[in-house]
Image (cartoon, grey):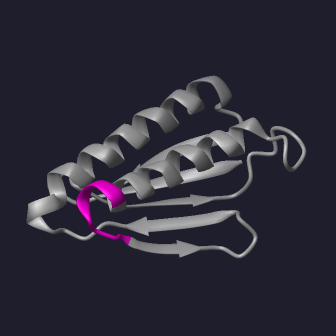
């Protein structure tokens, strides 16, 4: 199962997200849950970099089963970054609705 931990600050600002695990929906290379979660998360990170000019702190596992992204609190770009991350979360929740046995979102403060 893929777990996505989203960490928020007291203010509600999203500080980071961490994806770990494998969906195990289908064999490697044919797993649409993994492909969808990867596309949504990497697409959001790429959009943040391209549209705001900011590069978050990114940590990846060598086997493809781990991604952690931490967002800097830069006032000039914070709103845009937060909007992109919130859109990513909505997309991941949509995947979770249909494939909840393979992906789980967890919100932490």
What residue sits 42% from the left and 50% below the top? 44
Look at the image and tell me whether residue 78 can be seen: yes
Q: Is residue 29 left or right of residue 1?
A: right
Magenta stretch containing residue 95, yes or no? no
Residue shown at 25%/44% (left/top)? 83
What residue appears at the point 57 percent right and 25 percent down from the top-left corner? 97
> Looking at the figure, which quarter contains the C terminus?
bottom left
Question: What range is drawn magenta here?
Answer: 50-56
Query: In this view of the protein, which residue sits in the foreground, 2 or 108?
Result: 2
Where is 53 relative to 35, above or below?
below
- Which quadrant would residue 8 be assigned to in this image? bottom left
Q: Give the x, y percent position of residue 20.
A: 63, 60
Q: Residue at x 48, y 55 (%)?
A: 5
Which residue occupies the foreground of this view, 68 or 35? Answer: 35
Spot occupied by residue 11 in the image (x, y as percentages of width and height): 14, 55
Observer able to see residue 109:
no
Q: Nearer the viewer, residue 46 or 37?
A: 46
| Quarter of image, res 61 | bottom right
Up-down relation of residue 62 to residue 102 (above or below): below
Within the magenta stretch, is there residue 55? yes
Q: Percent x, y for residue 69? A: 43, 66
- Furthest toward the left, the residue is 75
In the picture as drawn, the residue positioned furthest to the top comes out as: 98
Q: Report x, y in % for residue 73.
A: 18, 68
């Amino acid at each position: 199962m893929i777990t996505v931990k989203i960490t928020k600050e007291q203010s509600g600002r999203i500080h980071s997200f961490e994806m770990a695990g494998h969906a195990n929906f289908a064999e490697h290379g044919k797993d649409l849950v993994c492909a969808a979660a990867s596309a949504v998360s990497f697409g959001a990170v790429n959009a943040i970099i391209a549209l705001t000019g900011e590069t978050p702190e990114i940590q990846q596992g060598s086997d493809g089963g781990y991604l952690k992204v931490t967002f800097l609190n830069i006032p000039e770009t914070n709103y845009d970054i937060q909007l992109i991350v919130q859109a990513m979360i909505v997309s991941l929740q949509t995947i979770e609705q249909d494939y909840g046995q393979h992906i789980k979102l967890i919100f932490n403060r």
